[in-house]
Image: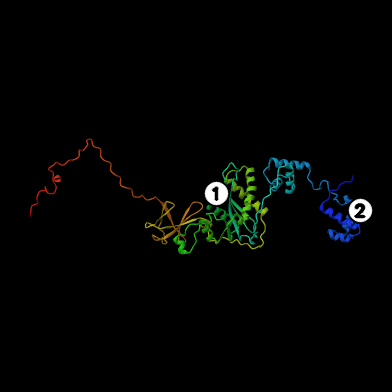
Amino acid sequence: MERQVLMSRKEARRKVEFEGVKAGRMSIREVSRRLGLSYRQCRRSYARYREQGDQGLVHRSRGRPSNRGKPLEFKDEVLARCREKYKDHGPTLAAEELAKDGCVVDHETLRRWLMADGQWQRHRRGRKHRARRERRAHFGELVQLDGSHHHWFGDDHDQCCLNDMVDDATGATMARMAGQETTEVCMRVLWQWIETYGIPKALYTDKKNVFVTDRAPTIEEQLAGQKPMTAFGKACSKLAIEMITAHSPQAKGRVERKHAVYQDRFVKLLKRKGITTIEQANELLNDGFVDALNDKFATPPASEQNFHRPLPKKLSLSEVLCYEETRTVCNDWTIRYDNRFFQLLKAKSRLPRPGEKVIVRRLLDGSLQIVYRERKLRFKAIAQPETRQEKKTLEPTMRTTTRTPYIPPPDHPWRRGKRAAAPRTKR
């Protein structure tokens, strides 16, 4: 009974070529060119085939344990740790966490071990056709900003929002967690980005009402030829940041894919550390988690030129990243804002006249500023003036006896009419 030999596709091709050499149809030099081997290597392989037959073509390491293979005890220890501590982790993230524990194993090796042990399955996703957009060439040329709503602290807790900024050229990220994707949170993330890297050239956002508005323009905006802007849009306009809105989530795919990274790695880290509050989560983000992501996933830009601009010295971020509204000065030099009244105090410089406009700034820390022609005015809060009250109706006085109505007698002039009235005497 002949013994069957399993061959790879490459080994089977060598057998066909060597049969041609054996039959005299081709030379070894010609076969070496066809197989992509050197002449000496082809001669050795052919000689081994002549001596051992088909078995001489099979790789001699087949069936033997690899010299770089891990011991079985180490494999069992790794699988046990994955089963107990990293049960919901993927192979790549689990390999990184195991390396911190002293168990160094390649993520592909761990993937095969977990699949053989039944702890991991392949996840195949259907793909939609999308046109590829190349990364921007310069760092700071385009930064994507978006919020990710997710159960960051587990299904037992309410959803929170992780506001994330990602540079399009490098993939560098910066994040901050809050309850919702609000204007204040987006301003604080942008503030942190500017303090770290500088002012970016453009921001890529969605069409949320934090970034764009559909309200009608005011009279002042119509006279100035300006489009209606949100508070965040006004701040970006002062910083000369161009705002670009995306028409679909796939258009800003860099930040969307970064959301998936946070939802995988950050959620598992929060669970391991037992963190369930937004304040603790932000401390963890600033305490090295974001820096570790940038070190691992950020790539160098195509161009060395940095498009970030330094913050001007006369410009304060606290007075730019804020809320601004216009108010009219009353005749007694008071203004009304947020259902509160403020008295403008006398100063050496000229105060705005009654009827003129001033700007009220509400900073992110809650403090207020009143600005007139780029000058900050002194003011104080006053009590709300009393409104006119309707006159109270007097209550009828209490009487001990009831009053009977007066009935005129029959001979009363009122009953006799005008004819019975006494004649007038001529003067």
Q: Residue at x 84, y 60 (%)?
A: 34
Mark 2 or mark 1: name the one nearer the start of the chain: 2
As rendered, which of 48 and 4 lies closer to the eye?
4
Left or right: 288 in relation to 74: left
Q: Residue at x 64, y 45 (%)?
A: 268
Q: Position of residue 2 (x, y in %)?
A: 89, 46
Q: Residue at x 91, y 57 (%)?
A: 23
Image quarter where the N terminus lies is top right
Q: Secondary structure at mark 1?
A: loop
Residue, disc 2: 50
Left or right: 190 in relation to 6: left
**Quarter of the image holding residue 41?**
bottom right
Give the CA separation, mark 2 to mark 1.
Answer: 75 Å
Residue, disc 1: 180
Q: Position of residue 210 (x, y in %)?
A: 53, 54
Label 2 neighbourhood size at 10 Å, few (<14), some (14-19), many (20+)?
some
Kind of residue at disc 2: Arg
Task: Tell which residue pokes out farthest to the top in this image.
Answer: 400
